[in-house]
Image: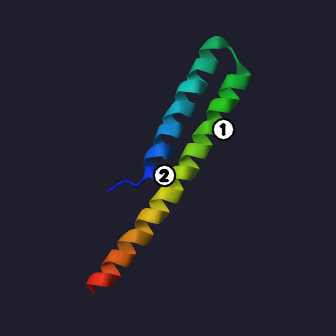
Amino acid sequence: MKNKDQVKGALKDIGGKIQEEAGKLAGSTTQQVKGLKNQAKGKLQKGVGDLKEAVHDLKEAAKKA
């Protein structure tokens, strides 16, 4: 099951990739950098979501044990 941080992080990462590519096509270094920054934020947010999911799974496993 995905949580909101995993989904939002993945979407932010994809949006950053699109922004970076648009910056390349337009010759805009600023847009490329913003795209890379959004990708990093997205990956971080997805990582937080993954960690939350792991903690949740551990709690569920402990309840069953």
Q: Residue furthest front?
A: 4
Q: Residue furthest top?
A: 26
**Does dot 1 land on a helix, a strand or a loop?**
helix
Residue 33 position (above or below residue 59): above
Residue at mark 1: 37
Give the spatial CA distance, label 1 vs label 2. 17 Å
Question: Disc 1 marks which amino acid?
Answer: Lys
Instruction: Say which residue appears at 54% left-offset and 47% top-offset.
Output: 43
Q: Residues within 10 Å of mark 2 (few under 14, many from 20)?
A: many
Q: Residue furthest right?
A: 30
**Does dot 2 land on a helix, a strand or a loop?**
helix
Residue 1 falls in which quadrant of the image?
A: bottom left
Disc 1 vs disc 2: Cβ atoms closer than 8 Å? Answer: no
Question: Disc 2 marks which amino acid?
Answer: Asp
Residue 53 falls in which quadrant of the image?
A: bottom left
Q: Position of residue 58 (x, y in %)?
A: 38, 75
Residue 32 position (above or below residue 45): above
Q: Position of residue 18 (x, y in %)?
A: 53, 26
Instruction: Say which residue appears at 53% left-offset and 38% top-offset.
Output: 12
Query: In the image, which disc is placed on residue 5?
Result: 2
Q: Position of residue 27 (x, y in %)?
A: 68, 14
Q: Residue furthest bottom?
A: 65
